[in-house]
Image (spheres, rainbow, N blue to C red):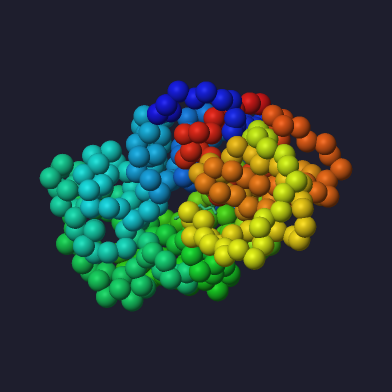
Amino acid sequence: MFKVAVSTYPLLEIDLSIIEKNIKVLLKKCASWHLHPVVVTKGFLADAPLVYLFYRSGIRSFADSNLENLLYTKKLLPPEVRLSLIRLPMKEEVEEIVAQGIIPFVSHWEMVEALSCEAEKQGKVLPLFLALESGDAREGFLPEEIEEMGDKIDDFPHIKVEGICSTLACLSGVLPDEEILERLVAFKKGWEEKWGRKIILSVGGTTFLSLWEKEKEIKGVDEIRLGEALLFGNDISRGRNIEWLESGAFTLKAEIVEIKSKEPDRGKETGFDAFGESGFSPEAGKRKRMILALGKQDSDEHQLYFADENAKIVGATSNYLVIDIEESNRVYQLGEVVQFQAGYGAVLRAFLSPYVRKVYHW
Ligand SMILES: *Cc1c(COP(=O)(O)O)cnc(C)c1O
C-alpha cells in the first residue's frame, strides 16, 4: 500500500474454502483426464495466501503473464516448482527469465535467439514453449513458420523446446473445438517424430475444459492452464457456470455515500467520461439512486453482481458506482455497506487497486 489506508472499504473478501474445494475437484478431474494442471495467477497478482493454498493443495506448476508475479511466486515456493511466463517476453525481461529459470512462451525466432544468447552468456540451457497461433489471431507462430524454420532449432544449443502451447477465447472469442485440438495434437506428433523426443502440448484457459467434460477420450494433450475455473467456477467465454465447481469466492463490499432522488437535466448536451464511454441513459423521471464509494479504478461495474434484484447498476465513474433503487423493496441507509459477487475483471481490478483492502477467510 503506497499510502496509509484510512477506511476499511472498499473491501474484497476472498473465501479460501471455496477455492480449495475447486482445486480438489479439478485435481481429481485432471488426473482422470491425464492432464497436468497449471494454475494461472494473473487474476490475483499471485497474492501469497492464494499461491500458498494452491501449493498446499498439490499444484506444482504456475503461470502468469507478468514476470513480476512469477518472481514473487518463486520467492514463496520451493525451487522445484515450475513457473511459466505466458505473455510473450519483452526484451528487457530476457536476462531475468534466464537467470531465474522462468519458462517463457515465444512466437518469434528473434526472441528464441535472444534467449539462447543470454542462456549461453549465463552458461545455461533454457527450456521454452513455442506458442502456436490456432485461430484467435492473437499470439503465436503460424504453423508453417515453425515447419519452415524447424531445423533452425539446432542453431540454438542453449535453448530446449519443452513444448508447444495454444491459447484460445481471449481476443476474437474463438472457442476451441475437437478439430482445433486434433490439429494441435497432429502438430505435436509431427514434431516428436521429426526430432525423436517427446514434447508437452499445453492448452488454455478455462474454455478448453468443456472439451474434456464430454468424457470422450482425448489423447495427446498434456496440460491445461486454468485461472477462471478455479477462482470463479465459471467459463465466461461460453457464458456458463461450471456445475461441478463452486462460485462466490470473491465478495466486494462498498459503502453508500449518498442516497437521493434525482433526475439528470435533459435537453443538455451529453459527453463522455474519463474512459471515453458515453453517459448513462437513465429512465425518465426522478429516480432514487444510491452512490457507493467504489469506482472503475477499483473494479469493473459490468462484473459486479448485486443480490437485490430490484436494484440496477446504472453505471460507474472513476470513483463512484451509481445504483438505481427506485424499484427496490429494501431500505438502504447512508453509511451502510453493501456487497457484490465479483467476476474475473472486477476481481483483477480490485487486486490492482491500492484503495481496495483484501481480506482472506475460511
Ligand atoms: C489468462 C490465460 C490463461 C488462463 O485463462 P482462464 O480463462 O483464466 O482459465 C491461460 N493461458 C494464457 C496464455 C492466459 O493468458
x and y percentages locating residue 24 in the rendered image: 63, 38
Q: Is residue 272 left or right of residue 28?
A: left
x and y percentages locating residue 223 in the rendered image: 49, 53
Quadrant of the snapshot with the N terminus: top left
Q: Residue at x 67, y 55 (%)?
A: 264
Query: Does residue 47 appear in the picture of this structure?
Result: yes
Q: Is residue 120 left or right of residue 71?
A: left
Q: How many marks?
A: 0
Camera-side residue: 190 or 20? 20
The picture quadrant where one finds residue 22 is top right
Camera-side residue: 25 or 199? 25
Query: Does residue 125 appear in the picture of this structure?
Result: no
Q: Is residue 58 left or right of residue 191?
A: right
Q: Residue at x 38, y 33 (%)?
A: 72
Q: Residue at x 42, y 56 (%)?
A: 200
Where 169 falls versus 101 (above or below)? below
Where 142 falls versus 250 (above or below)? below
Quadrant of the snapshot with the C terminus: top right
Q: Which residue is situated farthest in the right direction here?
A: 329
